């Protein structure tokens, strides 16, 4: 009888151990099994790349500030359209011209979008996108100044923004004195007040001051356009060797042009 009792006790113990082991396995399985919500969770969408643009917002209608200090103009609107077409987020920072190229070299921003003319000299220190605008140099004068040709500028003082192709052009005029300014608007103001004889800047900007600006259009006029042997184009400047940003900009610009959006923006700012 005792022998049967011992066998019964052993079998009962084994059954209890087996039941305990199964319970732990089931509990562990429940803890490690993924929930339905985890299985169905969608993958995160890839982040939209951000590209930072520096712009000297003193060149209406190319790039300037409105009454509320918003950055507006032909180029900012083009950049935003390129961002939409190219799948990137443009961030435009108002940046003074006198330090804009040094800031690019130091990596403070990715691109300069500020009416930068593509020149061989600049190509030595930075790279450019495809051209986005053709430009010439316009000569602003007071309407009764009697200045009609480049020869009439002999012996005159010409104002222009320092470091621009307008300033380089003023320096090249025989017999004229070139005076530099931090902003083209300061040169135009001095011309308006008779402190200088002429001001030179990109023709689109000169047209805006002479024809659209309420303060200046009654007294100032666009005397003529400086003719040169080579065409001058504006481009987006990037750090030398930054081929990826150049590729992104060129592809986005091409899409904006192909869609007709470029022409729409142009018509808005250059009536």
Image (cartoon, helix red, strand yellow):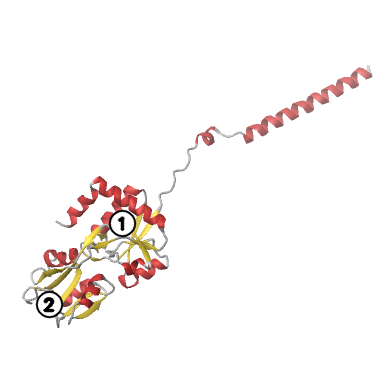
- In this rendered view, identify the residue nearer to me: 119 or 36: 119
> Quarter holding the N terminus?
top right
N-term mark: 2 or 1: 1
Q: Is residue 188 visible?
A: no
- In this rendered view, identify the residue nearer to me: 44 or 59: 59
Q: Name the spot of residue 167 as percent of width and height, x first.
A: 24, 74
**Distance CA(mark 2)–CA(mark 1):** 34 Å
Q: Quadrant of residue 65?
A: bottom left
Q: Secondary structure at mark 2?
A: helix
Q: Name the spot of residue 101 as percent of width and height, x first.
A: 35, 69
- The structure residue drawn at horizontal position 61% and vertical position 33%, both measured from the top left corner, is 33
Q: Name the spot of residue 129 as percent of width and height, x first.
A: 33, 58
Q: Which mark is residue 130?
A: 1
- The structure residue drawn at horizontal position 34% and vertical position 50%, both measured from the top left corner, is 251
- The structure residue drawn at horizontal position 47% and vertical position 38%, both measured from the top left corner, is 42
Q: Is residue 271 left or right of residue 3?
A: left
Closer mark to the observer between disc 2 and disc 1: 2
**Which residue is at the far right?**
2
Q: Which mark is residue 151?
A: 2
Q: Is residue 259 left or right of residue 32?
A: left
> Quarter holding the C terminus?
bottom left
Instruction: Say few, some or many: other residues with alpha carbon within 10 Å of mark 2 (under 14 / 14 to 19 / 20 or more).
Output: few
Q: Secondary structure at mark 1?
A: loop
Q: Name the spot of residue 126 as percent of width and height, x first.
A: 37, 65
């Amino acid at each position: 009888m005792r022998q049967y009792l011992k066998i019964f006790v052993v079998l009962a113990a084994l059954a209890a151990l087996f039941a305990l082991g199964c319970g732990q396995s089931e509990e562990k399985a429940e803890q490690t099994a993924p929930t339905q919500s985890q299985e169905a969770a969608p993958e995160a969408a890839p982040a939209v790349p951000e590209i930072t643009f520096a712009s000297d917002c003193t060149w209406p209608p190319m790039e300037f500030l409105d009454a509320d200090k918003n950055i507006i103009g032909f180029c900012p609107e083009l950049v935003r359209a390129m961002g939409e077409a190219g799948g990137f987020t443009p961030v435009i920072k108002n940046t003074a011209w006198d330090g804009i190229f040094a800031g690019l070299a130091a990596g403070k921003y990715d691109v300069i979008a500020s009416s930068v003319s593509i020149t061989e000299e600049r190509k030595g220190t930075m790279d450019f996108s495809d051209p986005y605008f053709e430009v010439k140099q316009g000569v602003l004068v007071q309407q009764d100044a009697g200045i009609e040709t480049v020869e009439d500028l002999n012996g005159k003082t010409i104002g222009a923004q320092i470091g621009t192709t307008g300033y380089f052009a003023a320096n090249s005029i025989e017999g004229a004195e070139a005076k530099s300014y931090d902003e083209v608007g300061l040169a135009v103001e001095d011309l308006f007040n008779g402190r200088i004889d002429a001001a030179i800047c990109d023709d689109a900007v000169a047209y805006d001051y002479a024809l659209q600006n309420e303060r200046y259009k009654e007294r100032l006029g666009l005397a003529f356009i400086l003719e040169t042997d080579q065409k001058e184009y504006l481009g987006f400047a990037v750090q030398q060797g930054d081929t990826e940003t150049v590729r992104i900009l060129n592809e986005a610009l091409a899409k904006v042009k192909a869609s007709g959006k470029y022409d729409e923006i142009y018509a808005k700012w250059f009536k």
